[in-house]
Amino acid sequence: MDKRKTLKKQRHLFVKDMPIVKLKKGVKVSAHDPHEKLKDKDFIYNALLECLKAGDSQAFLDVIDSYYQAMNKSKTLDNLNLSRSTYYEAVKKKANPSLNTIMKLIKGISKAG
């Protein structure tokens, strides 16, 4: 197999080099906070259901991880008697968490604020 060649001088992306985009007049812009949406239980439950329907286990774990990223992980996991290491092992790529762990994580969603 041939080795892939890489550029000797790597290109860098700088914010100052990005073009400035101006909005058209009359366009209304509102603030968007994705954490607020990720804290919505109904939104999370619907996303988990869609992952189950599609049979996408990694997306299922990603949704759970996104929820706990938006929440206070330490406090929530302590209330579930689930260690942080167990949580991180459960949501990492190529993970195969036990059903018991998944049930605890989903129970944590229903108990949270």
Image (cartoon, helix red, strand yellow):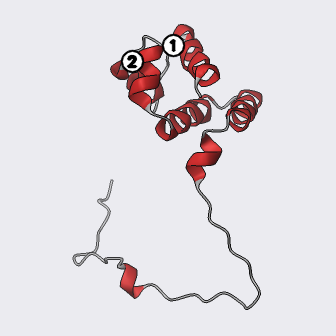
Residue sitting at the far left: 8
- Residue appearing at x 74%, y 34% in the figure: 42
Instruction: Give how far across and how far down residue 112 sits, in percent.
Output: 58, 25
Element at label 2: helix
- Residue underneath mark 2: 86
Image coordinates of residue 7 in percent, x first then y, are 28, 74
Amino acid at the residue labelled 1: Thr
The percent position of residue 10, horizontal first and vertical second, equals: 27, 75
Residue at the spot x=46%, y=15% of the render? Answer: 79
Q: Quadrant of residue 103?
A: top right
Q: Read off the residue under disc 1.
A: 101
Q: Residues within 10 Å of mark 2 (few under 14, many from 20)?
A: few
Residue 92 shows in the view = no
Q: Amino acid at mark 2?
A: Thr
Residue 6 vertical placement versus 105 (above, below): below
- Left or right: residue 100 versus residue 30 is left
The alpha-carbon separation of the residues under discs 2 and 1 comes to 8 Å
* Relative to 105, residue 26 above or below: below
89 vs 103: above or below: below
On the picture, is 86 further left or further right than 6?
Answer: right
Q: Horizontal and vertical percent for residue 23?
A: 66, 87
Q: Are marks 2 and 1 in contact (CB under 8 Å)?
A: yes
Tell me if I can see residue 11 in this picture. yes
Outermost residue toward the front?
Answer: 113
Residue pictured at 29% horizontal, 59% vertical: 3
Quarter of the picture containing the C terminus is: top right
Kindly state the secondary structure of the residue where label 1 is placed.
helix
- Labels 2 and 1: the sequence-earlier one: 2
Which one is in front, 28 or 104?
28
Q: Residues within 10 Å of mark 1 (few under 14, many from 20)?
A: some
